[in-house]
Amino acid sequence: MPRELADILQRYQGRGREALLPLLWEVQTAFGHVDAAAARTISQTLRVPEADVYGVIGFYTLFNALPEGETTVHICTDPSCALAGSEELLEHTCQALGVQPEETASDGRFTVKRTTCLGLCEHAPAALVARRGEGLHSVAPADAQTLLNGAKTPARADTLGGKAHIFLGGAAGERAQSLAEYGDYAALRRALTELTPEQVSAEVEAAGLLGRGGAAFPTGLKWKFTREALAQPHYAICNADESEPGTFKDRVLMEHKPHQVLEGLALCAYAIGAQEAYIFIRGEYPEAEGRLREALAEAEAAGLLGERVMGTDWSCRVEIRRGAGAYICGEETALFEAIEGKRGYPRLKPPYPTTNGLFDRPTAINNVETLSAVPAIVRQGAGWFRQWGTEKSSGTKLFSVSGHVRRPGTYEAPFGVTLRELLEGADYCGGVQGTLQAVLLGGAAGVFLRADEIDVPLTYEDLQTLGATMGSGAVMVFNDTVDLREVLRELARFFAHESCGKCYPCQFGTQRQLEILERLDAPLPGDRARLLDIGHTMTEASLCGLGQTAASAVLSAMSKWPQLFPSE
């Protein structure tokens, strides 16, 4: 056994299956893949069946059981990057190495792969580079020369704008806010000294804070249900597995305001009666993970997190867990499975996470943006938060805008701003490049709006009247030079690739949807009816949100632009 592998395994002695993903990451980073000998010793160390170790390796796309090049280059070809020329980037990179996608160069130095969204849509085209012994770094915007010359991550400044009332205040586009700049967790201090856990949940509920990951469930109510559950212990989880094409606002918060995320998670833990908290961050976010770890170390050193927080009897131990390339793990129960060291398969509901979540214990899970709103609510009060937005859509919202706008980026806006103002306003994107054809609102699982529909106010209730959805706040803009059929094919490829295969409607439906869209130029008799049937079946019969929304964009396009779908 190599000495380096023995040293890694030694650190995991006495741990169980829940340590499988961290251990696999250490081995993968050190050796570039997890070979048969390593899988066998991992199985023995954690007392996990060897077949299950291979099952996990095969499920997550960033793990490899077979050798690859010293450097693996993953190039995103989802819609925003495709608009910026990622297919050409992939072709040029492969030509320079004399390989096809998914192949390794003859000298063993490089492997080139096509990948799904990397959450760098505003900097498209983007790539993720994995170097043996060094781990991952992201490159955006990318070019073939940068990817092949061994350069480290180029300096990148994010475009942040809008009305920075709650989320983006004090954020700099190129670096993380330090603890000294952020402050000493005043909201958590107030909660620990002045408020009961029940009062924290009540304040969040009074503020009308809805989940910002797409489901829009009342946050305070979720926390109340979790605290009232009898089983112990309770867990608080930050879902940072943001993987929806077109969505990158959670990455921005983690990279630029990590202490705000950590304080929000700590307030959640206090409110639900938890002392253990996890941040599950997607594997494709190396910079965000690094900045979160630095911030966590700062907070622990200052006594703001960890054992006996701020000198009280309450502890809040936070662990950061890295995913490994599976969009499905953004679904809350699949995320639990991943933390527990399993394939990220969604669970049947009920029971719900508030009673049977992580390790089958009561769990409150919220996404990054939701938790980032909580410190301001606890500091300033529910009434302060409600000064923005509407009765049903309170506060402000982060929007990830990419595609054909003058200033792609992350924008904070009060609920009620119109989509037109977001796209054209001087405080926001500054206008559309070219003639607007369509907006995909809500990410890959969202719906299309035509150019004549962009005066709609961005609230949950107003979008509902159009049959549209807020989703995670992704806004993808397409001018009239774009073939929307190709956009639909890219979205279909994403869902076909990311379906976990647990339920038949999604496993079968995403594949058939892609097949039909790929032959739109020469359709078979009955293809239009088949596409509608597949879409409605997935929506009604799939187990989780992935399958239930995998046809949303296609169905909306069929309704708004029927000429794109020839009938026999």
Image: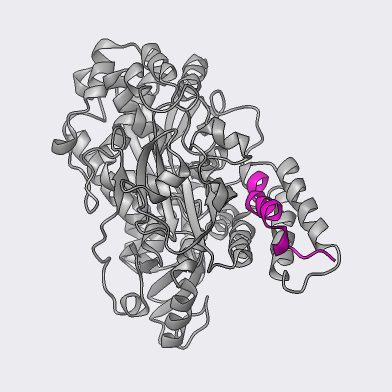
- Pick the residue in front: 378 or 366: 378
Q: Which residues are magenta?
A: 547-568
The quadrant in which the C terminus is found is bottom right
Taking 202 as reference, is 480 above or below it?
below
Counting labels gives 0
Q: Is residue 532 visible?
A: yes
Which residue is rendered at x = 77% and y = 65% of the image?
Answer: 566
Q: Is residue 48 visible?
A: no
Q: Is residue 305 left or right of residue 463?
A: left
Residue 511: x and y, percent? 71, 61
Taking 295 as reference, is 482 above or below it?
below
- Pick the residue in front: 155 or 335: 155
- Pick the residue in front: 238 or 242: 242
Q: Can residue 157 be found in the magenta stretch?
A: no
The quadrant in which the N terminus is found is bottom left
Q: Is residue 496 left or right of residue 357?
A: right
Residue 97: x and y, percent? 42, 86
Residue 125: x and y, percent? 41, 67
Residue 349: x and y, percent? 65, 31
Q: Is residue 425 left or right of residue 521?
A: left
Q: Quadrant of residue 497?
A: bottom right
Q: Can residue 558 be found in the magenta stretch?
A: yes
